[in-house]
Image (cartoon, rainbow, N blue to C red):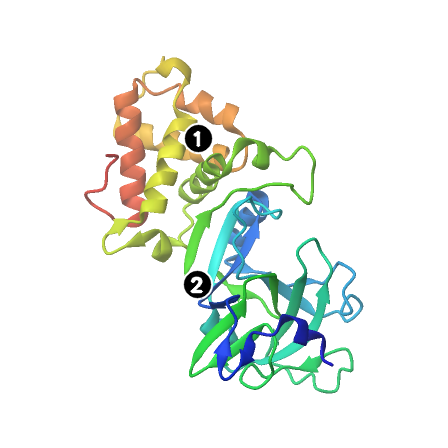
Amino acid sequence: MSEWKKYALNVGKGKLSDDAQELETVYHVVHARICRRILEDEKLRAGIIGDESILKTSRIAVVWTSANYWHNGSIYGSVRFGFKWKKLVRDRKIYWVEDREYRNPAYRLLITERDLSNDKRLQAYDPETDNGPLRRIDGSWYWNGKYTSEFMIDQDIPLAQAASFDFVSHAKCRESRSCDEEKNGYQSTGGQVMSFILGNGIHGLDKVLADDGDLTSEANSTLISVYRALLPKAQKFDGVLSKTSSVTAAIRGALALHGSGQRSEAMKLIATIRDEDVFEKGLEEIVRSHFDLANWKFD
């Protein structure tokens, strides 16, 4: 019996089990420091499989994605990239890799352009006929949401293919017992990442942060986090900068510093501005210029 049978979605007579969820988007979640590298590279780089997988010695490099959303927080970080499943899987083959006995068992499928039918470690998987955790019925895709889905994409994914970008709770960090990102919360991380984007003029995600001539609600919310993070304590400004060009230069520098984790140094630059009103107008100007939104401002 194939390993995937225990995750079967078809319960007979053409019906899917209650665990079947329509599969539209898969996600890749990382810490902020990894996100910075992705933004600079303009791609999610495939990496060699590092855990106790049967493919550990294969030298196959993959980008890990999943359809799951963990309400108690992701163990991988709080920055989430979303990709449309149909686009990722189009014209590609699917192979069953293995399942893993985690607290919530995981099933793994490899998505590839290569013909790996001669690799004895893998089993070819047909989502239209094989009754496992991934099904394709009348053009629609379904996955077994009762377990942990792990879809291994065996090539780099261009950032341009991202369909969404947001921030999620981070809990039980798999890398550190004293993770600042977990402690500070995803809103704080979101503010830091948005600062990195604005401070370094990174435009790879503009199309998912702006929609129909305005920023998305997620982007607007994140910009509030940027504002609060850079606002001096007790709202005290003691600088002299008031000219737009000087103010925006100072704020851009502060954004770049905060985005790289140097908030205290960023605050020193913000302190050179005359007052909060000048600071707010300067930050608004940077946002308008970055996203080409002539009328954008903080509500």
Instruction: Tell me which corner region of the image, top left, top right, bottom left or bottom right, holds residue 112.
Output: bottom right
* Picture coordinates of residue 167, whole percent (x, y): 47, 45
The residue that label 1 is drawn on is 254
Which one is closest to the eye, mark 2 or mark 1? Answer: 2
Numbered label attached to residue 160: 2
Instruction: Tell me which corner region of the image, top left, top right, bottom left or bottom right, holds residue 225.
Output: top left
Amino acid type at mark 2: Ala
- Closer to us: 129 or 64: 129
* Picture coordinates of residue 43, whole percent (x, y): 53, 60
Numbered label attached to residue 291: none
Image quadrant occupied by the N terminus: bottom right
Label 1 packing within 10 angstroms: few (<14), some (14-19), many (20+): many
Observer able to see residue 65: yes
Label 2 packing within 10 angstroms: few (<14), some (14-19), many (20+): some
In the depicted structure, whether residue 213 falls above or below residue 197: below
Question: Residue at 48% of width from left, 78% of height from top?
Answer: 15
Image quadrant occupied by the C terminus: top left
Instruction: Tell me which corner region of the image, top left, top right, bottom left or bottom right, holds residue 182.
Output: top right
Observer able to see residue 242: no
Q: In the image, is 247 to the left or to the right of 155?
A: left
In the depicted structure, whether residue 129 falls above or below residue 171: below
* Picture coordinates of residue 195, whole percent (x, y): 43, 38
Disc 2 element:
helix
- Closer to us: 221 or 277: 221
In the depicted structure, whether residue 30 falls above or below residue 269: below
Disc 1 element:
helix
* Picture coordinates of residue 264, whole percent (x, y): 51, 23
Question: Residue at 60% of width from left, 41% of height from top?
Answer: 171
Question: Residue at 53% of width from left, 84% of height from top?
Answer: 128
